[in-house]
Image (cartoon, rainbow, N blue to C red):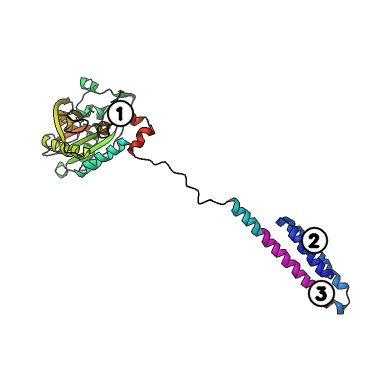
Amino acid sequence: MNDLDQLVQAAQADFLQAGAPADLENAKARYLGKAGRVTELLKALGALPPEEKKARGAEINAAKQHVEAALNARRQALADAELASQLKAESLDVTLPGRKRGEGGLHPVSRTMERIEAIFGSMGFDVADGPEIETDWYSFTALNNPENHPARSMQDTFYVDMKDAEGRWLNLRPHTSPMQVRHARAHAAKYASQADMPEIRVIAPGRTYRVDSDATHSPMFHQCEGLWIGENVSFKDLKAVFNDFFRNFFETDDLQLRFRPSFFPFTEPSAEVDIAFSSGPLKGRWLEVAGSGQVHPNVVRNFGLDPERYIGFAFGMGPDRLTMLRYGVNDLRLYFECDLRFLSQFK
Ligand code: DAH
């Protein structure tokens, strides 16, 4: 074995020993660097007689190529090993079962709200939304319930010690009835003359507040207001609407409706609406589900409409109560306690 073969072998062995790219670069310098063994041999060529130079030069170059080939092979091997170990470290076991995400569902009262909107929607009612912090005027005065009138104490209102920009006292709305006035006024304002105005047919579901707390009352609860005003809308229409609504809502024809005379400042005459099922666990019991009545002329006037021309009815019902009846819930406070053992039953 000549000196060049030995050199190639030594380089190959050195390169193989290099366990990391930096070691390999150091090894390379020992052979191919400025003072490397191959470089020194090439430098020494100059001292040879011309007749030997050519042959020796070719041999050294061949040896150099072998050294470079060994270097490149080792570089590649180290890079491959690096990649392999990286892939191994970051490997993903696709056969592992996935982590399950909890399944959500609509709150039972939200379901009821959606049902109410869908059923009234199918009867041509719009859905309106309004503020939960109301002014005294919308909550009471506009609804024919003047300041200091004893009828105001029918509702245990949360009064707020604060006025709005126009100096009107604020409260947390104790019912959705202010939405009758808000919606009707906005509706009427859209038409230049009352002759162009289409009927008002709207429901306004939402949150309401009263100082009240027991198994069937919560300080925050829900109501759904309804209003139908036109030139020829009567109590008979109210009965028809309620008949259709409750049969649809409870998905049964086994149901009776009763209008019981009552008092609300904003309606005259006024009635509480009771229903009774002819079968099932609640069979034969009259259950109060809504307040209603023919809208009082003073309220129609506050709508910005002429009470000689416009007449209709309004109602307010309790989606919380309807949800209790539909699903057999016996304590309304369960709705607001966020207990998943209760809520997950409605998924
Ligand atoms: N606002 C009444 C309440 O909270 C319910 C009600 C009764 C609404 C009669 C009406 C109505 O629109 O006509 O007790």
The stretch of residues the image draws in magenta is 53-78
Residue receiving disc 3: 57
Amino acid type, residue under disc 3 in the picture? Gly
Say whether residue 2 is left or right of residue 259.
right
Q: Main secondary structure of the magenta part?
A: helix
Query: In terms of image quadrants, where is residue 347?
Result: top left
Q: Which residue is mark 2?
A: 30
Q: Quadrant of the N terminus?
A: bottom right
The reply to whether discs 1 and 3 touch (Cβ–Cβ < 8 Å) is no
Label 1 crowd bin: few (<14), some (14–19), many (20+), radius 10 Å: some
Q: Is mark 3 within 8 Å of ligand 1?
A: no
Q: Which mark is residue 332?
A: 1
Question: Which amino acid type corresponds to the residue marked 2 in the rendered image?
Answer: Arg
| Image point (73%, 67%), residue name | 68
x, y percentage for residue 83?
Answer: 62, 56
In terms of secondary structure, where does tag 1 sit? helix
Amino acid at pointer 1 = Leu
Q: Quadrant of residue 42?
A: bottom right
Q: Quadrant of ligand 1?
A: top left
| Residue 258 placement (x, y as % from top left) | 14, 30
Question: Residue at 15% of width from left, 33% of height from top?
Answer: 256
